Image (cartoon, rainbow, N blue to C red):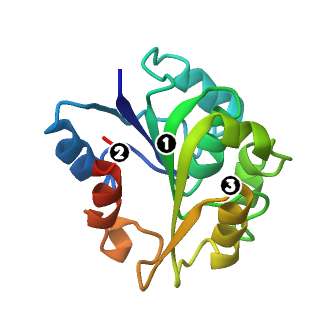
Amino acid sequence: MRNVFVFHGVGGYPEENWFPWLKKEVEKSGIKVFIPQFPTPEGQTLENWMQVLGQYDELNQDSIVIGHSLGVPFLLNVIENQPVKEAFLVSGFTGKADNDFDDSMKTFAQRIFNWEQIKRNCGRFCVFHSDNDPYIKIEKAKELSENLNSELIEVKGAGHFNAKSGYDTFDLLLERLNGVL
């Protein structure tokens, strides 16, 4: 059964940014949305996040996954082992992000990804990034897009696509998501 998973980033939680708005909008069409609460910043490791996700039996080959910030390398780790239908990557990166959070994100992002396996396990990718993200450089989004052979949608002035940048809603993401629901 089709469903949607949203993965937050460092210090994130299910009720922040555009997540609750997106959940409400998508669930209007009868599709269930899951936004797990991962341990962060305390206990923030790939292993701990995988344990939390393991509590959800609903993740399957028909699922659509959305990652924001650290949620992007997390979803790439997930897709490496679990087929999904589509993935939306918002303000994402792999490797070092070159910011203050690099040490706490090491287990998620600073590894060699099996890009061919990830592409085999996901039907389509869409990368969103801003031209003025204060945490993740646009070059990181370009690398992701190239590694995934995916579309890169560069949004002017969107910052980190968070509430601080005015993103309590995310119409462009919803529009793209509705195209596959």
Look at the picture and state if 141 lies above or below 33.
below
**Amino acid type shown at disc 2:** Val
**Residue at image coords 49%, 42%:** 86
| Label 2 SS | loop
Per the rendering, the mark at residue 128 is none
In the displayed structure, does residue 65 sit left or right of residue 181?
Answer: right
Which label number is shown at residue 148? 3
Q: Is residue 91 above or below residue 36?
A: below
Which numbered circle lies on residue 180? 2
Find the residue positioned furthest to the right: 112
Q: Is residue 21 left or right of residue 104?
A: left
* Relative to 25, 170 lies left or right: right
The reply to whether the C-beta atoms of the residues labelled 2 and 1 are less than 8 Å apart is yes
Q: Mark 3: few, some, or many residues within 10 Å (few <14, many ≥20)?
A: some
Quarter of the image where one finds residue 113: top right
Q: Is mark 1 on a helix, strand or loop?
A: strand
Residue drawn 71% across the image and 50% down it: 104
Tell me the crowding category of disc 1: few under 14, some 14 to 19, or many 20 or more residues within 10 angstroms, Cα based: many
Please state, as top left, top right, bottom left or bottom right, where the N terminus lies in the image. top left
Pick the quarter of the image with the C terminus.
top left
What residue does disc 1 label?
86
Amino acid type of the residue tagged 1 in the rendering: Glu
Question: Which x, y percent locates residue 118?
Answer: 70, 40
**Label 3 sits on what residue type?**
Leu
Mark 1 or mark 3: whose residue is earlier in sequence: 1
Nearest the camera: 75 or 164?
A: 75
Residue at x 40% of width, y 45% of height: 13
Q: Closest to the observer: 85 or 135?
A: 85
Q: Using the numbered discs, state the Cα–Cα distance from disc 1 to disc 3 in whole angstroms.
A: 12 Å
